[in-house]
Amino acid sequence: MANNKKRVVIIGGGAGGVVLANRLPKDEFDITIIDKQPYNYFLPWLLYIAFKGSRKPIKREIRSVLKPWVNFIQSGANVVNLQDRYVELESGKRLEYDYVVIATGASVDYSRVPGLDKVTEKFGNYHSNEDNAWRVWQTLNKMREGTLAVILAPGAYRCPPSPLEGVFLAEEFFRRRGLRDRVRIVFATFYPRPYPAEPMNELIEPLLKERGIDYVTFYTLDRIDPEKGVAYSMEGEELKFDSAIVIPPHVGVGIKYVPGDVLDSDGFVQADKFTNRVKGFDDAFVIGDASALPVAKTGVTAHLQAGVVAKILQGEDARNTGRTNCPFDVGYGLGTFVISDFYNPTIKYPINRINHLFKVAFAATYWDMLLYPELWDPVFESYFEATEPARIRHLYG
Ligand SMILES: Cc1cc2nc3c(=O)[nH]c(=O)nc-3n(C[C@H](O)[C@H](O)[C@H](O)COP(=O)(O)OP(=O)(O)OC[C@H]3O[C@@H](n4cnc5c(N)ncnc54)[C@H](O)[C@@H]3O)c2cc1C
């Protein structure tokens, strides 16, 4: 019997790629995931390795979180030829497709800020890998006094609240250790205010002041010298530090595309924000951090976009709403969520213990959610409905 199934090739077995693969019905699609390495990482937990010394495992084998009928190939993809409809693997082997979905995430680029590689080597960061996150934990533990600078380098980055989450958790760390009056904490950002979206900033800026955390805005990191302990901004400011944790600029992952102009200047793939179709191609999609879309680079975004693309592939007229739902840990067991969509700006969503509990609960369900979207969908649909920006915005101003 002829195989009429559509061949879907998904590049990247991270938060977005896996959930999409597991959502596609096996009787309609031949589904293949390609990843250059064997693990699915729960990157949000890097925050807790860095600032709480967590030893919880943050990776699982990609194969173990895929439905049995999904094919997994461990290999880098070197070329995506959208014109001739194939993906070329490291070995040179070509996979032809009916649909391709790019879910390759983002990578960090230290070369954009002179000195950043050395700073990372010395103090760590929590936006790349477990080793660097652990180095942050060691940095905190070594500090007895002086200035800790947390600097958001200019460019794209994962998870909008994550820079300030690090700041708040560092403050809690030093206070609990009885060192708070000896350690100054300063947050430097290129945005005009500590949290970029004003309504959320109305909650965050007073909290920074209340906790005695200094901040510098309009600070565009230019170069950094770990030996002298100085970070220089393009605006001419010199920020002195004893330890510095920098959120590095993020870029695309360096796959060659044909045609090349689907990429923006940072190597992210350009697409339609409602359908995630790659610019100019009906059979190619990009989801999650790999896209150049003006949406937050979060796992939730990737997950929701995967749901839309799964429906489109099955012939539905589905569209993204641009919904964000980023949990925001502000320390001391308190949290909020950054909630918005294409039609509603960020809501001033309250800081409380229950919202922090939601963050912890989402983390606990992560791999189960990837593997069993059919079980978790009703839970998340209820949550998203209850917190729909248009529905709740009048409650919080
Ligand atoms: C500190 C921190 C806190 C965060 N907190 C949250 C949070 O609270 N909530 C939230 O929703 N999100 C959070 N995020 C963001 C979230 O982790 C990412 O947005 C999410 O992982 C994006 O999913 P993705 O599928 O697009 O990419 P990824 O999960 O990064 O997966 C990409 C995959 O593609 C593979 N790949 C790359 N290049 C190639 C290639 N050439 N060939 C084959 N495979 C390739 C990679 O190996 C990887 O497995 C946080 C991130 C950080 C760093």
Image (cartoon, rainbow, N blue to C red):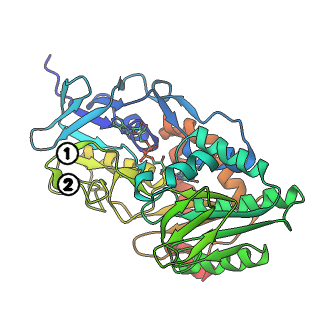
Foreground pick, 84 / 347: 84
Type of amino acid under label 2: Val
CA neighbours of label 2 inside 10 A, class few (<14), some (14 to 19), many (20+): some
> Is 67 placed left or right of 225 in the picture?
left
Does the beta carbon of the residue at mark 2 sit less than 8 Å from ligand 1?
no
Query: Which residue carries the number 1 mark?
Result: 257
Judged from the image, the secondary structure of the residue bearing numbered disc 2 is helix
In x, y percent, where is residue 301? 45, 55
* The N terminus sits in image quarter: top left
Query: Which residue carries the number 2 mark?
Result: 262
Residue lying farthest to the top in this orientation:
1
- Could you tell me which residue is drawn at 15 percent across and 44 percent down? 82
Does the beta carbon of the residue at mark 1 sit less than 8 Å from ligand 1?
no
Instruction: Tell whether label 2 touches label 1 (CB within 8 Å).
Output: yes
Give the Cα distance between marks 1 and 2.
Answer: 7 Å
- Could you tell me which residue is drawn at 66 percent across and 78 percent down? 205
- Could you tell me which residue is drawn at 74 percent across and 66 percent down? 352
Judged from the image, the secondary structure of the residue bearing numbered disc 1 is strand
In x, y percent, where is residue 329? 68, 60
Type of amino acid under label 1: Tyr
CA neighbours of label 1 inside 10 A, class few (<14), some (14 to 19), many (20+): some
